[in-house]
Image: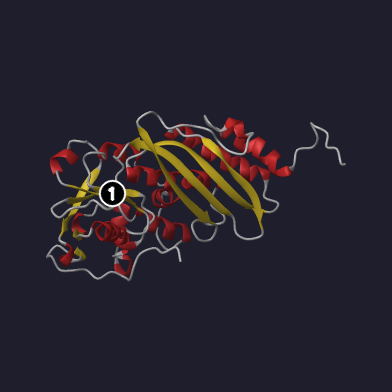
């Protein structure tokens, strides 16, 4: 029988976890010393769970700063919680790093996560760390909580609802183009919006009891609005002139890029429908009314100032 002495050499995987990820451990994580986390949601609340992955060369540039990658990974998942009206609780993370990854790179990745953990009040609950011969792959499962039966859904929009969106639209899509070179971005605003989206967690919580339906804009404004309409069995109209654009995005949205804000994706703003405009305005949040929900037979359309339909390129972002 082979005997293994306690206190021996720590395997490389666990050494990396101890150095970089154990300091991120939140309540219930058991200091990342066990196989799973143990926790309970607050009384009278139910769990909300979502998961997103990012792959190098698909969802981020291989040379993106590592401190922004951890933050974006966390933020796109927080955006899913925001769309449900949920309060963040913690997260599980799986990292598939290329063999021989530089320890300093991982340290910067973890430092970025630490910044956003403090900002959004969440902690690491566990996960897995592996190596891969393929592109770096990062996956995160976010866990939150919401009052029982109060989670916002995509399927509750009703004819007569106003359609609203937070923040500004199109910045993420133009940010990717700015990083690649063809779009001017002197102060880095667009690149920042692509690399560090702003999950509207507080707005999502405020919309519980005010909005009928909600989701975040990740795959393109019109594609995501069509998701709400399909799940709710309704139609809808978005007025292009009402969609809020940042000045630099408006200036870039010309020629072949004129319609990019409406289908480009990577905004991570909240798109929602609500029956009472006054109740939305009373929230005091940075939101804009951009359209209306109609009967299913009227379809889903983007219209110009004259009411004429605007044809978009087929679809928005697709993961396949």
The residue at the point 67 percent across, 41 percent down is: 16
Q: Quadrant of residue 238?
A: bottom left
**From this viewpoint, which residue is outermost toward the front?**
1
Q: Quadrant of the N terminus?
A: top right
Residue 67 appears in the rendering: no
| Residue drawn at 16 percent across, 66 percent down | 297
Estimate the x, y position of residue 10 in percent, counting from the top left.
75, 38
Q: Position of residue 302 (x, y in %)?
A: 21, 64
Q: Which residue is mark 1?
A: 214
Residue found 17% across the figure and 36% down from its top: 282
Q: Is residue 244 left or right of residue 14?
A: left
Q: Residue at x 34, y 59 (%)?
A: 220
> x%, y% of residue 269?
33, 48
Q: Give residue 252's position: percent from left, percent from top.
A: 32, 60
Front one among 36 and 119: 36
Residue with the most extreme right position: 1
Within the image, what quadrant is residue 98 found in? Answer: bottom right
What's the coloring here? secondary structure
The answer to whether one can see residue 312 in this image is yes
**Depicted 130 relative to depicted 304: above or below:** above
């Amino acid at each position: 029988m082979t005997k293994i002495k306690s206190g021996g050499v720590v395997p490389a995987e666990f050494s990396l976890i101890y150095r970089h990820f154990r300091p991120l451990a939140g309540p219930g994580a058991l200091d990342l010393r066990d196989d799973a986390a143990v926790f309970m949601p607050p009384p009278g609340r139910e769990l909300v769970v979502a998961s997103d992955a990012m792959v190098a060369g698909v969802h981020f540039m291989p040379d993106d700063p590592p401190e922004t990658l951890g933050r974006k990974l966390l933020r796109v998942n927080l955006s899913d919680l925001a769309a449900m009206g949920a309060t963040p609780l913690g997260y599980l993370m799986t990292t598939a790093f290329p063999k021989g990854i530089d320890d300093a790179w991982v340290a910067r990745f973890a430092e970025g996560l630490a910044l956003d953990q403090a900002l959004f009040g969440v902690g690491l609950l566990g996960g897995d760390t592996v190596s891969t011969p393929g592109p770096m792959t990062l996956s995160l499962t976010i866990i939150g909580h919401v009052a029982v039966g109060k989670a916002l859904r995509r399927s509750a929009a009703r004819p007569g609802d106003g359609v609203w969106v937070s923040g500004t639209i199109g910045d993420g899509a133009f940010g990717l183009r700015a990083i690649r070179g063809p779009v001017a971005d002197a102060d880095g605003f667009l690149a920042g919006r692509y690399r560090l989206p702003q999950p509207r967690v507080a707005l999502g919580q405020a919309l519980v009891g005010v909005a009928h339906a909600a989701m975040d804009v990740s795959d393109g404004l019109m594609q995501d609005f069509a998701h709400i309409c399909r799940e709710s069995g309704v139609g809808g109209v978005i007025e292009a002139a009402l969609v809020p654009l940042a000045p630099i995005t408006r200036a870039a949205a010309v020629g072949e890029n004129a319609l990019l804000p409406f289908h480009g994706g990577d905004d991570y703003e909240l798109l929602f429908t609500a029956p009472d405009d006054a109740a939305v305005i009373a929230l005091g949040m940075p939101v804009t009314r951009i359209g209306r929900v109609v009967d299913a037979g009227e379809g889903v359309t983007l219209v110009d100032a004259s009411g004429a339909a605007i044809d978009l390129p087929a679809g928005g972002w697709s993961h396949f």
